[in-house]
């Protein structure tokens, strides 16, 4: 009788992550992961302490990918690049975007988005427009920009804009981003 195959926690988590990436969070199940690994459900149950733990792990990986998208220079403007990366992630990684931005997983969405916003604020601390501002003001600047990017990302992700290419998305982000930046500058000058 051949020895039973042993699976590492990393192998099980990778299988679960790829399942969500390809099919969405609703497809995630212990049986599905076991089937993907061609094993019984026992190693999966042993590895996955809870569904919450699994969802958090998948969301953390999705967030890593999202942050790479947002930190990739594309336009020469860090703030616009962040929004552009967010929308491109929503288009390219449909199921991962839905995994972390689904109202059915509101608690997960809130936790992931708070981590994302914290990373964006940190990444913009040296941005000329907000440099030297209190962190709360930088957070508000980023949050308001994220509101627009999230709306566009959702429209792209759900197929409302089914055929937007990189250049079209970049054009939308630059157009709105530059106007937002100018408006913010005007408000800041009015406060002086």
Image: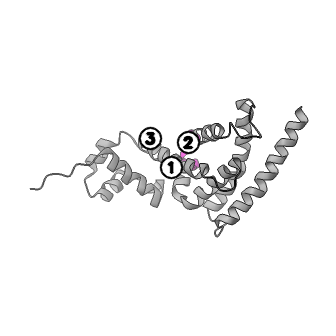
Helix, strand or loop under label 2: helix
Give the quarter of the figure containing the N terminus. Answer: bottom left
Residue contact between numbered discs 1 and 2, judged by CB atoms under 8 Å: yes
Residue contact between numbered discs 1 and 3, judged by CB atoms under 8 Å: no
How many angstroms separate mark 1 from mark 2 (CA)?
9 Å
In the rendered structure, which disc, 2 or 3, sits on the residue that comes first in sequence?
3
Question: Is residue 149 rendered to the left or right of residue 129?
Answer: left
In percent of the image, x 52 and y 54: which residue is there?
96
In the picture, the disc for residue 112 is: 2
- In front: mark 1 or mark 3? 1
What is the count of numbered marks? Answer: 3
How many angstroms separate mark 2 from mark 3 (CA)?
13 Å
Label 3 neighbour load within 10 Å: few <14, some 14-19, many 20+: few
In the picture, the disc for residue 62 is: 1
Instruction: Please state the extent of the stretch shown in magenta in the rendering.
Output: 101-111
Q: State the residue position of label 3.
A: 52
Residue 150 seen in the current view:
no
Percent x, y of residue 119: 60, 39
Percent x, y of residue 64: 51, 46
Magenta span dominant secondary structure: helix
Label 2 neighbour load within 10 Å: few <14, some 14-19, many 20+: some
In the rendered structure, which disc, 1 or 2, sits on the residue that comes first in sequence?
1
Residue ranking furthest to the left? 1
Helix, strand or loop under label 3: helix
Quadrant of res 159? bottom right
Q: Is residue 21 magenta?
A: no
In percent of the image, x 37 and y 48: which residue is there?
13
In percent of the image, x 68 and y 48: which residue is there?
78
């Amino acid at each position: 009788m051949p020895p039973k195959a042993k699976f590492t926690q990393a192998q099980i988590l990778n299988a679960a992550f790829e399942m969500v990436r390809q099919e969405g969070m609703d497809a995630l199940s212990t049986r599905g992961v076991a089937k993907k690994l061609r094993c019984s459900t026992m190693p999966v149950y042993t590895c996955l302490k809870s569904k919450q733990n699994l969802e958090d792990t998948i969301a953390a990986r999705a967030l890593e990918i999202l942050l790479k998208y947002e930190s990739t220079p594309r336009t020469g403007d860090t703030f616009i690049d962040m929004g552009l990366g967010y929308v491109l992630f929503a288009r390219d990684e449909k199921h991962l975007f839905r995994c972390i931005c689904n109202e059915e997983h509101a608690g997960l969405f809130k936790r992931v988005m708070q981590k994302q916003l914290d990373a964006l604020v940190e990444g913009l601390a040296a941005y000329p427009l907000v440099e030297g501002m209190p962190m709360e003001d930088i957070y508000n600047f980023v949050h308001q920009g994220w509101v627009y990017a999230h709306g566009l990302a959702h429209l792209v992700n759900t197929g409302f804009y089914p055929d937007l290419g990189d250049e079209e998305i970049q054009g939308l982000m630059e157009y709105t981003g530059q106007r937002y930046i100018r408006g913010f500058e005007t408000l800041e000058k009015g406060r002086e």
